[in-house]
Image (cartoon, rainbow, N blue to C red):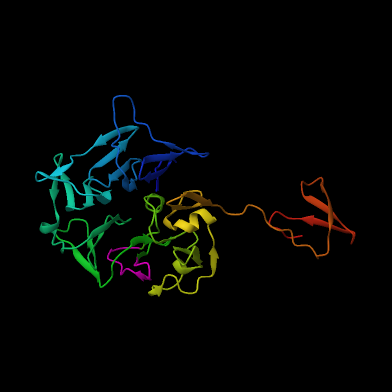
């Protein structure tokens, strides 16, 4: 899942690409004369310029630019491009993709294997993330590496962790999630700390867990959906991501039976949970309970001359003025 700068919410599935119009998901239809590959979507990245990168399970990468689909080459060094697991564009406009063929970089319209020249170790490659400092992060095997602006080679930052997803808390700190553990990433930038920008928060969904805008950490598979309050506002210490959550939300029986596999928070603060059976949305409750003395059974409501709400309660006969936050 991803949300582009124009507000569209995008969902990549085994049967193609969908977008949410605020009411329902509709299959994306390309403009006349353009075609969308009939392949399962394995990667979606919303870019800060409003474009959307679309990666496919059976190889290939497309870019949605102002409604038009641009397809990139399906081969590298005469070999098919493998499944695209992650993709992004750096601050210099260079397109990168983590694929079954390794780390690819687009040069003059052609894919080049960039891993060897950058010192990338062998192993599974995933989680390409461009942070607010222009640093390009990626996970390979049990290592987390970073390419800083202007650097010629990657630098290993963490070892011994198999990364499930890489995400940022609202204050801008980067965290590595192994599904079992949540590990803070030592900062590599110079200068002042910057908070997580909106384009980074809505760039892509997370497979294991994510930080919401309030710094709470939501995790899948605990079972159900668990929330640990204030982790993103606390100290930079490693912790078990599923240990002693503060609350647990059970998805619908249909979704829970198949297990959830993606989490995403949109720009309005809605939390989306995707599973093999469909998508569920969790929203903030807009109702605040009015705190009265208790024992009330019937209520008469009116608005006074100042626009405030009054309620007469029975059988105890109390008259209350109600504030918007529930105070009375």
In the picture, measured across the screen, residue 96 lies left or right of residue 12, that is left
Q: Is residue 178 magenta?
A: yes
User: Residue 226 versus residue 291: which sits nearer the camera?
Assistant: 226
Q: Position of residue 160 (x, y in %)?
A: 25, 73
Establish if 113 lies above or below 231.
above
Predominant SS of the magenta segment: loop
User: Residue 76 versus residue 92: which sits nearer the camera?
Assistant: 76
Q: Position of residue 269 (x, y in %)?
A: 51, 52
In the picture, measured across the screen, residue 99 lies left or right of residue 283, that is left
Magenta residues (range)? 177-192
Q: Position of residue 125 (x, y in %)?
A: 23, 59
Establish if 289 lies above or below 40.
below
Q: Position of residue 189 (x, y in %)?
A: 28, 63
- Residue 136 seen in this snapshot: no
Task: Report the residue at 77% width, 49% height from top.
Answer: 308
Establish if 186 lies above or below 46.
below
Res 4 quadrant in image: top left
Furthest residue toward top: 32
Task: Report the residue at 44% width, 66% height from top.
Answer: 232
């Amino acid at each position: 899942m991803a949300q582009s700068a124009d507000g569209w919410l995008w969902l990549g599935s085994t049967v193609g690409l969908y977008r949410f119009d605020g009411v329902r998901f509709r299959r994306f239809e390309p403009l006349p004369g353009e075609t969308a590959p009939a392949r399962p979507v394995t990667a979606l990245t919303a870019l800060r310029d409003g474009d959307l990168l679309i990666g496919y399970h059976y190889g290939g990468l497309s870019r949605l630019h102002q409604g038009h689909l641009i397809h990139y080459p399906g081969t590298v060094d005469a070999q098919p491009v493998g499944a695209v697991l992650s993709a992004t564009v750096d601050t210099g406009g260079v397109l990168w993709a983590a694929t079954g063929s390794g780390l690819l970089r687009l040069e003059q319209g052609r894919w080049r294997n960039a891993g060897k020249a950058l010192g990338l170790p062998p192993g599974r490659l995933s989680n390409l993330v461009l942070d607010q400092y222009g640093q390009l992060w990626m996970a390979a095997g049990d290592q987390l590496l970073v390419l800083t602006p202007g650097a010629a080679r990657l630098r290993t930052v963490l070892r011994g962790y198999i990364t499930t997803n890489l995400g940022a808390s609202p204050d801008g700190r980067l965290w590595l999630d192994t599904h079992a553990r949540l590990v803070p990433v030592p900062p590599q930038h110079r200068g002042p700390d910057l908070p997580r920008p909106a384009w980074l928060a809505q760039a892509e969904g997370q497979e294991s867990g994510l930080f919401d805008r309030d710094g709470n950490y939501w995790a899948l598979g605990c079972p159900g959906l668990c929330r640990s309050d204030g982790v993103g506002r606390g100290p930079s210490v490693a912790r078990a991501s599923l240990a002693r959550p503060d609350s647990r939300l059970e998805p619908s029986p249909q979704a829970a039976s198949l297990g959830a596999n993606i989490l995403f928070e949109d720009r309005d603060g809605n939390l989306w949970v995707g599973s093999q059976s469909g998508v569920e949305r969790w929203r903030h409750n807009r109702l605040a309970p009015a705190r009265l003395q208790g024992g009330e059974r019937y209520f008469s409501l009116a608005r006074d001359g100042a626009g405030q709400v009054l309620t007469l309660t029975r059988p105890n006969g109390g008259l209350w003025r109600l504030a918007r936050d529930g105070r009375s």
